[in-house]
Image (tube, grey):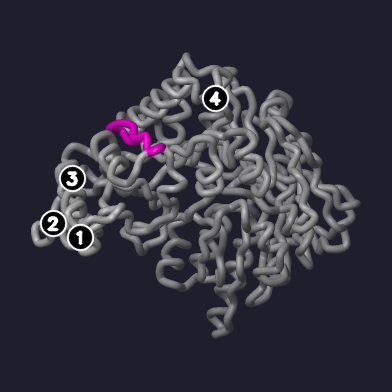
Amino acid sequence: MRFPVLTPQEAAEYFHNGDNVGLSGFTAPGAPKVIPGAIAEKAERLHAEGKPFKINIFSGASTSDKCDGVLARANAIGIRTPYQNLPDLRKRINAHDCHYFDLHLSELAQKFRYGFYGDLDIAIIEVSDIKDDGTAVVGFGVGNVPTYAKYAKKILLELNSKIEGKLYGLHDIYLPLDPPNRDVIPIFKPSDHVGSPVLKLDPEKIVGVVMSDSFEGVKAFTSPDETTNKIGANVCEFLINEMHAGRIPSTFLPIQSGVGNVANAVLYGLADAKEIPDFEMYTEVIQDAVIDLMKSGRIKYGSTSSLTVSNEVEQEIIDNIDFFKEKVVIRPVEISNNPEVIRRLGVIAMNTALEVDIFGNVNSTHVTGTKMMNGIGGSGDFARNAYISIFSCPSITKEGKISNIVPMVSHMDHSEHSVDVIVTDQGIADLRGKDPIQRANEIIDHCAHPMYRDLLRDYLKIGGETGGQTPHTLGAALSFHTAFLAGGDMRGADFSKFC
């Protein structure tokens, strides 16, 4: 090998306080696995000496405990974007020990190229293969690696022996030109390849290679339960009815699905819905459920930015890589989540919400409006540009102490203008073509849990007495949340003083 092989500790010496650092990967797949731990050790050592040390991390999405986790515990992250999902980092963000700015995932790479965030000092890129001329095959997640590789002053590689020499042909690496020279992204069906199976690195930037030997460590999602099964069945009912009404072509359309147990339940529901033909996906993350459905032939093809699968499924993909090369392509996130392509293909977007208000606004990120959970992720990329935008959530959580249908969301990530359909375990609210009062009645009647419907109707009635197109009563709008904060149960909301 042309490039020096370094220990993780030797690699860590390339990082300095205040550095802007780009990470490969998208969710845990493709993210660095050994160098961040050594950086965290360096941070702890310098902090003990009374010296400042924090780096600014730009990734594709979330990473893993081996990256965000160890660095957060060492208080070694100064700025973090565009997405995260680990408890230790979440605590730092909510305590303002880390400056986190939430961002639509499709936007970060181009905004970095536009110069909005300064120079990129160093990039850490996981690869499954590297040639002396700098030609590399990346791992199971691409994210923003083409941009970070091009703009980084220095590059450190992690060569993962678990996947070494096994993934060639799985990727489509494409870097669009920037305005005013940007051209059409020529993707007309999910299986179109428009770039290269390899990443071209400048060998003069590569300062060393660190060896790793680790799968991604993604946990398998829990089996669908009664609530998630009902949500999945309701989504399928809606889509089947849309096909019967001629509003979705009989050949169906590509699906985008968010991450988590609800998303998995929806996919399994689609698999069992025989009225829906075998379909394709144009999405940002492929999970275990998708792999199962590819093997059965239910999903014909999947375009993604990451294979976010459990260790067992990751090994299965490696063992059957020729089969999956015909079924999957892994792209940069600015392509997998690109508004132009999403709208052209007519993608049906299915994402999850923390809470939804009665007028159709969605909170995806903040608990009681203040505490960041994970981030907006790619939901906005898809929701605003989808053929149909569906958001789903359970009607209640914490044994009914929380209603996920509220008078006003405590934080808004997706406005009513980007939301077509709300689905809960209670039913389906089709919001298309409805004014605010009609949307409110639709959501209360079909999506709210029965134990909260009267409270929500009371709120709507009070607002109606004050007038206005969207009849909020601002003094009472967050009464569900204040009741929960005061007594731990939203059912304690009291609108009597506003009557």
Return the disc, 4 or 3, that comes first in the chain's sequence. 4
How far apart marks 3 and 2 lie (CA) works out to 11 Å
Quarter of the image holding residue 205?
bottom right
Q: Is residue 232 above or below residue 330?
A: above
The three-letter amino acid code for the residue at tag 1 is Ala
273 relative to 162 in the view: left or right: left
How far apart marks 2 and 4 lie (CA) works out to 49 Å
Q: Quadrant of the C terminus?
A: bottom left
* Residue at the top extreme of this rendering: 274
Find numbered disc 2 in the image and state the secondary structure of the residue it sits on. loop
What is the magenta segment's predominant secondary structure?
A: loop
Query: What residue sits right under mark 4 in the picture?
Result: 292
The three-letter amino acid code for the residue at tag 4 is Asp
Q: Quick one: 418 or 396, which is closer to the camera?
A: 418
The residue segment tinted magenta is 423-433
Find numbered disc 4 in the image and state the secondary structure of the residue it sits on. helix
- Mark 3 neighbour density, 10 Å: few (under 14) some (14–19) many (20 or more): some
